[in-house]
Amino acid sequence: MGASAIVETEVQTRVSGICPPGQAMSSIGVDGQVACVGIPDGDITGIIDGVGIEGGCFSGDCTLTVDTVVIQARVSGLCGSNQAIRAISQSGAVTCVNVPGDDITGITTTSQSRLSGRCTTGTCSLSVDPTDFNSSNPVGSASTLSAVSTLSGSNLWRPLGQFTLGATNRTGELLLMANADVTCLGCPTPSGTITCKMGFSRSPSGELETSGNSRTIVGFDDNTFRTDNMANVEELSASGGSVLTVYLVGRSAAGISGRQCLFDNIKIGGIFAPN
């Protein structure tokens, strides 16, 4: 059968056409020739920038960049020795500051610190202000008597010791503390006792500063001889500029004559806290 016998409406003539690059066949004629159309680059019709991105387009070539207002550019700066980074810019550049070898540039003391000493370089030496606290160089000095006895029924305060606060240019509070062993002299068996009292006074034989005295009962109780350890704490106001002497005093309460309170191992101390 020859070519003249082919019915082109029923049988496709051999395709002989080709499309150039960037195009594709859209139809083939009965004679085998082809119709071509252009091929789009892709199905993206537009690019819109989002958070941290700048740029965008709806046709052609798009250019996108990172928004360094939102996203930090890579940090590329360096600081020298004895320096530190203080700030980082949007571009990644750094701002440096000097770092001192020591962060203490000086030490001073105030009247409220209760310390003495100061320095601006080197090693600092600080110590407790001896005008404020009883340390190895106390502001106050204490002295006590040896064993002191007080007769029952005399009702008189007798000095057991004293504490002296040296002159200071500040007012404040003086906290006094005292301790003593107490026993009874002349208390008969089996049940002879006596009441003993101890406290602080500004006079060696005067009344107490406050009612805050300590008291105890010693002597024989059912054939058992009892002693005690007395302690007393007193807070007094101290005015500046003068020496203050406070006395520790003791006495026996009214009772049977001949019985006595014996105070021994007496200890006195004090702390001055300025206002």
Image (cartoon, rainbow, N blue to C red):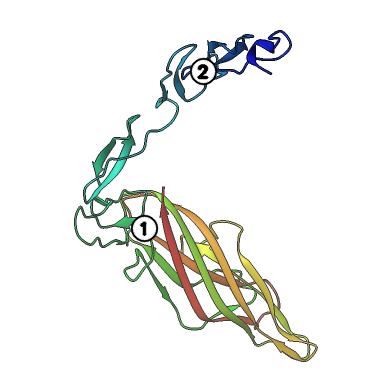
Question: Circle 1 sits on which residue?
Answer: 132
C-alpha separation, residue under disc 2 versus residue under disc 1? 110 Å
Q: Is residue 94 above or below residue 65?
A: below
Q: Position of residue 2 (x, y in %)?
A: 65, 16
Residue in front for this viewpoint, 237 or 153: 237
Q: Label 2 amino acid?
A: Ile
Secondary structure beneath dot 1 equals loop
Q: Nearer the viewer, mark 2 or mark 1?
A: 2
Q: Which mark is residue 22?
A: none
Secondary structure beneath dot 2 equals loop
Q: Position of residue 13 (x, y in %)?
A: 63, 15
Q: Quadrant of the N terminus?
A: top right
Q: Is residue 52 above or below residue 254?
A: above
Q: Residues within 10 Å of mark 2 (few under 14, many from 20)?
A: few
Residue in front for this viewpoint, 203 or 181: 181
Q: Is residue 206 above or below residue 70?
A: below
Mark 2 vs mark 1: which is more N-terminal?
A: 2
Question: Circle 2 sits on which residue?
Answer: 18
Left or right: where 225 falls relative to 241: right
Q: Residue at x 25, y 60 (%)?
A: 124
Q: Label 1 amino acid?
A: Asp
Q: Position of residue 57 (x, y in %)?
A: 47, 13
- The answer to whether the residue labelled 2 contacts the one labelled 1, judged by CB atoms less than 8 Å apart, is no
Q: Position of residue 222 (x, y in %)?
A: 80, 88
- For the question of whether residue 204 can be seen, the reply is no
Q: Furthest-right residue in view?
A: 222
Q: Is residue 87 above or below residue 240?
A: above
Residue 114 location, quadrant: bottom left
